[in-house]
Amino acid sequence: MRNPSPGRTGRPRSAAADAAILAATRDALVELGWSKLTMGDVSARAGVAKTTLYRRWAGKSELVVDAVAELFDALELPDRGSLEADIEYVVLRFAELLRRPEARTALMAVVSESTRDEALRDRIRSAIVDRQKRLVVLGRERAQARGELPYEEDEFLAGRTTDLIFDVIAGTVVHRALVSSEPVDELWVATFTALLMHGLRGPAAA
């Protein structure tokens, strides 16, 4: 969750209140949908005043993005001993998260709305996409330390590679789970991981 804006003063934010507000936002979104969701609905469910919401979030778009971001921030990448095992683990956990009604509904809602709202696209990028790239960075660092992947000396190219890996994994899993509505089971994940590993390792040496 975010820290208060530098220009704001007054009582410190309550982590418990923030958590209640974000949970209420996800519940309301599942029940009401994006078009019917209001800040008033959220404040009533969370048991806080609307002024409390507006001190934290400028409007519904920011609030819903942060409610989605909180779910994805729970994703972790424990060391499974190999890059392949790490990828399989995080893909399965990601798919499990997308099966939750509050995650599926919230993500689809903000993505749809962002097609008409550039500021919302920027917030999705900073609050969700950029923050979740930490998993790719961590996975690559571990794989490089194990000798599974080469180090990239050029920081710009390393960043581009991180972006590409994230796009391939996130894009494929979201399409499979939410667009095609096909299962993301262990067999599919193993096949996908094998394909990704082939690309990451590059062509075999002659």
Image: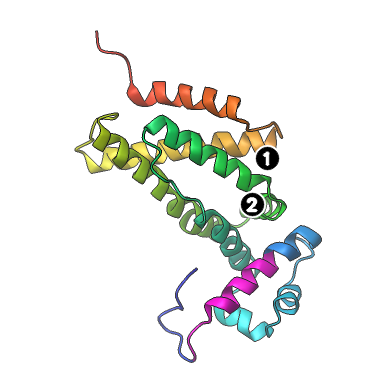
Determine the image quadrant of residue 161: top left
> Do the numbered discs 2 and 1 sit on residues whose CB atoms are within 8 Å?
yes
State the extent of the magenta-drawn residues as a range: 11-25
Point out the image quarter for the C terminus. top left
Numbered label attached to residue 107:
2
Q: Does 8 lie within the magenta span?
A: no
Is residue 57 visible in this depiction of the protein? no
- Please give the name of the residue rendered at 61% of the width and 54% of the height, measured from the top-left corner: 114
Q: Does 19 lie within the magenta span?
A: yes
Q: Secondary structure at mark 1?
A: helix
Question: Does residue 125 lie above or below 42 as drawn?
Answer: above
Question: 36 and 204: which one is in front?
Answer: 204
Residue at far front of view: 81
Question: Residue 3: percent from the left, percent from the top?
Answer: 44, 74
Q: Secondary structure at mark 2?
A: helix
Question: 67 and 60: which one is in front?
Answer: 67
- Please give the name of the residue rendered at 50% of the width and 57% of the height, measured from the top-left corner: 73
- In the picture of the structure, the residue carrying the numbered disc 1 is 178
Point out the tag, 2 or 1, that comes first from the N-terminus: 2
Residue at far left of view: 153
- Please give the name of the residue rendered at 53% of the width and 77% of the height, measured from the top-left corner: 15
Question: Does residue 7 lie above or below 173 as drawn?
Answer: below
**For the residue marked with disc 2, what is the amino acid?**
Leu
Question: 136 and 187: which one is in front?
Answer: 187
**For the residue marked with disc 1, what is the amino acid?**
Leu
Is residue 27 visible in this depiction of the protein? yes
